[in-house]
Amino acid sequence: MTSQRFGAAAQAVVDGNHEPAKLQLSTSAHEGPRLLIIGAGARGNAYARAVSESTNACVYAVADPIQQKREALGRKYIWKGNDPIAGQVFDDWRNFLDYEQLRRQIKDEGGSVGPGVDGVFICTLDEMHAEIIIGLSSLNLHVMSEKPLATSLKDCLDIYKVLQPPHEASPKALFSIGHVLHYSPHNMLLRKLLLEDGVIGEILSIEHTEPVGWWHFAHSYVRRSRKPGPAGNATNCFSCAVEGECIYSAKKTYEERFLKSGNAGWPVHIIDPEIEDLVGTKGMQWATERLRSRLTEDYNDSTPRDEVERRPWFGRCVYESDNDVCDDQIVTMSWDDDPLPREKPLSMGEQLRGRGARTAVFHMIAQTEKQCERRGRVYGSGGEIEYDGKEVRVYDFATSKAEVHYPRQPGGGHGGGDDGLTRHFVNAIEAVMQDTMPIQDAQMLHIGCTLDEVIRSHAMVFAAEDARRKKSVIDWQGWWQENVESVMHTSPR
């Protein structure tokens, strides 16, 4: 039964034209959490793999408007060698919502139905997150939303208002955000050394660099003003007179850099997930032709503007990109002393422990050899730490000695962060399902952050963007009160 057929059947039941028994759902013997993946692209597949390989949960259903993508994910992680059953595949998240509401209605009326899902991974386009999270909120499913939570502060706050219960009530479901690097072994070790072990004393200053990678950034966007003159009005690499000389050529990036070297995975499978299968079933020539057919897709002056903006054009001239994301940005954040109130006879040192003045500098740069190999230094009152994603070096001022830590380097994406986040999310769901702890405790113990903290971290980004656009220094307290506090009724921290 497809989602489209179920949608028609669901309406018939609502109208009273069918008996509930005709919509009995298949059951499953799986004992762990059942999860829905909304968005069967690269991130949806990454989390589906992590669920399957690193947890006791199962991917039970998928929703995606592109048939090829949802069926590819379903074959690999859900129904595998079998046919999908009712409730496992949907062409739209709204169809899942209709389905699940009807399934619960039938169950409440005493009908025989199969299990629903316990949680959902939202892996769609960024601008769709808010609508989906708010739309599914009545189901009280545990939610993991891919980052960012939303693309505007208003959408973030709208999500908060819907999901955050009144102060006297407990939350009805868990919420996690796709900040996968929080859960990588490298960063978990770094956090432990800094905050739990205090190996460098009080943190005074942080400098962090995020090297995107020159071709990796071009995979998404490059500033239009740099387009070479001889390229003329070309909008596609395969019709460009200077394609052979351009380092950002889509042909060079996807075909020559990856496919010809035998890598049909990321980023090639983002362009067309079938290419990876074609390499094994029909050979490299078929795969190359399929890739080129996708890369040569182009638009012209007669193409409706909304169509141009609606879909990705992977063969598009990077200089014709309509994105305006910075390719070089430095954000400086500073904190003043924030001592604890004198409720107890504390020394100034005790009042300022963990709350002293400090500075953090974040530098994102696209034109780099390294690709997402983040590096930085943390300076403290008793030493300094240097890190690069592979090792953490701690230098002690008192002993003049350095100790190097080598965190575990697991497989999977983001240095093990994909699997780490997924594992923590599933562990939290299991704790709630087994009644071993209330939701708010599972949220903190396993997920490690709250919805309030998710909102606060996103608000900081929007404040930084205000500072960039307005070319001004933003006072966090004032900015929060003006833009957030009136909606969230909470104070900045």
Image (cartoon, rainbow, N blue to C red):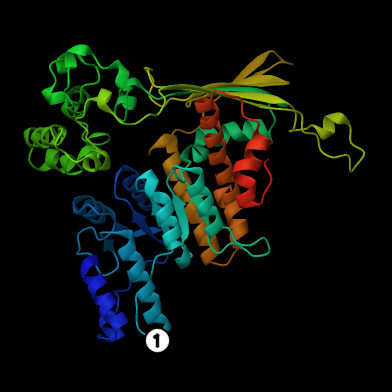
Q: Is residue 76 above or below residue 466?
A: below
Q: Quadrant of the N terminus?
A: bottom left
- Name which residue lies at 51% across and 41% down: 183
**Residue at the extreme right of the image, as rendered:** 345
Residue 33 visible? The answer is no
Amino acid at circle 1 = Gly
Q: Quadrant of residue 271?
A: top left
Q: Indicate left or right for 267 with 417 as reference.
A: left
The one of 369 and 319 positioned closer to us in this rendering: 319
The one of 340 and 380 positioned closer to us in this rendering: 340
- Name which residue lies at 38% across and 72% down: 101
Q: Residues within 10 Å of mark 1 (few under 14, many from 20)?
A: few
Q: Position of residue 12 (x, y in %)?
A: 25, 80
Q: Which residue is the site of mark 1?
A: 110
Q: Quadrant of residue 201?
A: top right
The one of 185 and 10 positioned closer to us in this rendering: 10
Q: Indicate left or right for 194 with 325 as reference.
A: right
- Name which residue lies at 39% across and 20% down: 370
